[in-house]
Amino acid sequence: MTNDNEKTRAAADVQPVKGTSLWKDAWRRLLKNRMAVAGGALLILIACAAILAPTLTPYAFDEIHLSDGNHPPSREYPLGADHLGRDLLTRILYGGRVSLAVGIVATFVSIIIGVSYGAAAGYLGGRADNIMMRFVDILYGLPFMFLVILMMVIFHNAPAEKKLYLLFIGLGAVQWLTMSRITRGQTLSIKTKEYILAARTSGAGVFRIISRHVIPNLLGPVIVYATLTVPAVMLEEAFLSFLGLGVQAPMASWGSLASDGRQSLDTYPWQMIFPGLALAITLFSLNFLGDGLRDALDPQMKDQK
Amino acid sequence: MLRYVARRLLTAIPVLWIIVTITFFMMRLAPGGPFSRERVMPAEVQKMIEERYHLDEPLVKQYFRYMGNLLRGDLGPSFRYKDRSVNEIIAAGLPTTLQLGSLALLFALLVGIPAGCLAAFRQNSAVDYAAMSFSMVGVSVPNFVVLSTLIYFFAVKLKILTVSGWGRWDQMICPVVALGLMYSAYIARLSRAGMLEVIRQDFIRTARAKGLPERLVIMGAAILTGSLIIETISGVPGIGREFVNSALNRDYTLTIGTVILYSGFLIIFNLAVDIVYAFLDPRIVYE
């Protein structure tokens, strides 16, 4: 083996060394990060529980047992019941569907807007880039969250489903600015990298350069930022729902369940604590996974550990 | 430098104008009005009230009237609080919100910086892991959950602290800690990373240092948004609470007034960052 290595080193000037791909490398580093793996596993568990909710609990989402109103946690109701005797565990599982959906869809909206805008600005460069990014600077000065709150206030009496779509778009629109800045910066720096020049001089076509060099290097930061955007969006959704402006009955999210529970915090604390805990654990896992991904994919960190 | 600041302040004017215009028309397009919740009034009374607030005029005329008053610094009368102007309401609530925000930031710095530095000096030790796990918890738990938990334990169970109101220390602890906790966790992570780079004498240091003030400013803006919900829940009489209530009550002028105030803060924060950049990085030249 040592012999082989020496041979390769001697031949390095002539022949390129076969290296591991960026993704394989990142994957291996991610697996080494125990907290990130734990976060990822917990997330899969939570997502499965939310998806499989109908098979996991004997109750329906809106099944009312008036005689068991405000029932404390017990065998029948593992996490207690609310004032109408609805099983809280069931409501949390179903609420998780809405919370996770808002987080994922709104993040997707922000990726679509942000990446196409940022990549266009970075690729075009020059004057167009200047104007496009100046526009982003101006939008940064707008208090988006206030505008989303205003929008939700205006459509306060709209049907619950319509409000859900508004949340997707509104919260996605809040997050796209940073996404576009990251993409633009990344595109700009990738354009001038030596490996692009090397690829070009060795005869690679535009398509090959974009597919083999630009997109993989763009994808890393975008994925990392997206993973960290999901908890931010979920937090904003919970924030709006807690104010009574987000997800509304008959639907429920962790934020709206916590909001319902707050009214009886002094007497039946579990009604507030469990939905809040579900939200906190999910955000916790997402943040750990996002951090792990960043460490695994950030090329600057590559040689440090 | 001075010219740069002046130019930035000038570009802030169209931004504010856009915000005011969007807010004005968004509010007016919303169904319901400031007086629609009250008991049915005789048509004459209704007409008198509408005349008094110029609601009977065409919308465009109302818009120009509002903008004209705004230029003179008059935010108009409140529609909901009788006999009080928006200027008065803001003047009454702003000091509370600023106190809450700056106390929360102070708490975040006092807890976050020592925790982050300690973790960096003992990198990969139990202290480090404990501090970082704790900060991850802090980043992940929503502030309204923190506040409710604090209220439950300290106000309901132990009866040491009280909620609702502002001014005495026992009223202030819960909201300040709830608002500041998330940012103390954030600062702990930032200062650990910064400290590690200083220890390692890293060349990336400057790159990271450039990102730091930006994050601090985003945090300042986020604290203002956070104060919305904290004030609403804990009954702190600031302007954050007025924003949500006024929007729900269709108190048009008060809503626009609070939005202008918040946008003004955001613009000043952004300008502050760019100025700090200039001090940190001599390569940046402002013309």
Image (cartoon, coloured by chain):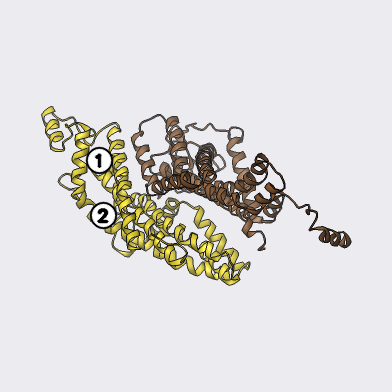
Q: Going 23% across and 37% down the picture, which residue do you hit?
A: B34
Residue A134 percent location from the top left of the image? 42, 48
Numbered disc 2: secondary structure: helix
**Of tags 1 and 2, which is closer to the observer?**
1
Decide: few, some or many residues near mark 2? Use Cα within 10 Å; few <14, some 14-19, many ≥20: some
User: Label 1 amino acid?
Assistant: Tyr
Q: Subunit of mark 2?
A: B
- Mark 1 or 2, nearer chain start: 2
Question: Which disc number belongs to residue B81?
Answer: none
Question: Which disc number belongs to residue B93?
Answer: 2
Q: Which chain is yellow?
A: B
| Quarter of the figure with the N terminus of chain A | bottom right
Decide: few, some or many residues near mark 1? Use Cα within 10 Å; few <14, some 14-19, many ≥20: many
Q: Is there CB contact under 8 Å for labels 1 and 2? A: no
Residue furthest to the top? B43
Residue B29 seen? yes
Question: Which disc number belongs to residue B252?
Answer: 1
Q: Subunit of mark 1?
A: B
User: Label 2 amino acid?
Assistant: Gly
